Amino acid sequence: MSYYPPPTNYGYGAAPPPNHLVWAILTTLFCCLPAGIVSIVFAAQVDSKWASGDHAGAISASNNAKTWAIVSAAVTAAILVIYLIVIAAAAANS
C-alpha cells in the first residue's frame, strides 16, 4: 500500500503560491521587526523555489511567510494590549 498525497491546486503550469511579501514588509515596518524579517526571508524564497521546480518547498515557504507575518502582528498586538493595561493601571493608581 503506497501513500498518495492529497491533490492540490498547484501543479505544472499553475501559478505559484502567494509569497505574502507585502504582508511581510508591512509587519516588519509596523510590527515586530525580528519576526517580520523572518517572514521576508521566507517570502523571498517562494518564487525562486517555484521556478526551480521545488513546488513543495515553495508551498512550504509561502506557508512559513504567512505564519511569521501573523506572529509578527500578534506579538505587536499583545505588547500593545499589555502597554495599555499598564497605562490604565498607572492612571487608576494616581
Image (cartoon, helix red, strand yellow):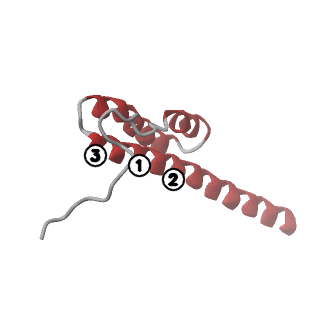
Comparing labels 3 and 2, the label whose residue is closer to the camera: 3
Rounded to the nearest angstrom, the CA distance separating label 3 from label 2 is: 22 Å
| SS at mark 1 in the image | helix
Q: Residue tagged by mark 2?
A: 71
The location of residue 6, given as percent across then percent down, is 31, 59
Q: Which of the marked residues, 3 or 2, is nearer the chain's N terminus?
A: 3
Farthest residue, direction left: 1
Split into 4 quadrants, where in the image is the N terminus? bottom left
* Residue 51, quarter of the rendered image: top left
The residue lying at 49 percent from left, 38 percent from top is 20
* Residue 91, quarter of the rendered image: bottom right
Left or right, 34 with reference to 1: right
The residue lying at 46 percent from left, 38 percent from top is 18
The residue lying at 56 percent from left, 40 percent from top is 27
Amino acid type at circle 1 is: Asn
| SS at mark 2 in the image | helix
Rounded to the nearest angstrom, the CA distance separating label 1 from label 3 is: 11 Å
Q: Which of 42 and 76 lies nearest the eye of the viewer? A: 42
Rounded to the nearest angstrom, the CA distance separating label 1 from label 2 is: 12 Å
Q: Which of 78 and 24 lies nearest the eye of the viewer? A: 24
Comparing labels 1 and 3, the label whose residue is closer to the camera: 3
| SS at mark 3 in the image | helix
Proximity of marks 1 and 3: CB atoms separated by less than 8 Å: no
Q: Residue tagged by mark 1?
A: 63
The location of residue 84, given as percent across then percent down, is 75, 58
Tag 3: Cα neighbours inside 10 Å, few (<14), some, or many (≥20)? few
Comparing labels 1 and 2, the label whose residue is closer to the camera: 1
Q: Residue tagged by mark 3?
A: 56
Q: Which of 41 and 1 lies nearest the eye of the viewer? A: 1
The location of residue 53, given as percent across then percent down, is 23, 34
**Above or below, 35 relative to 81:** above
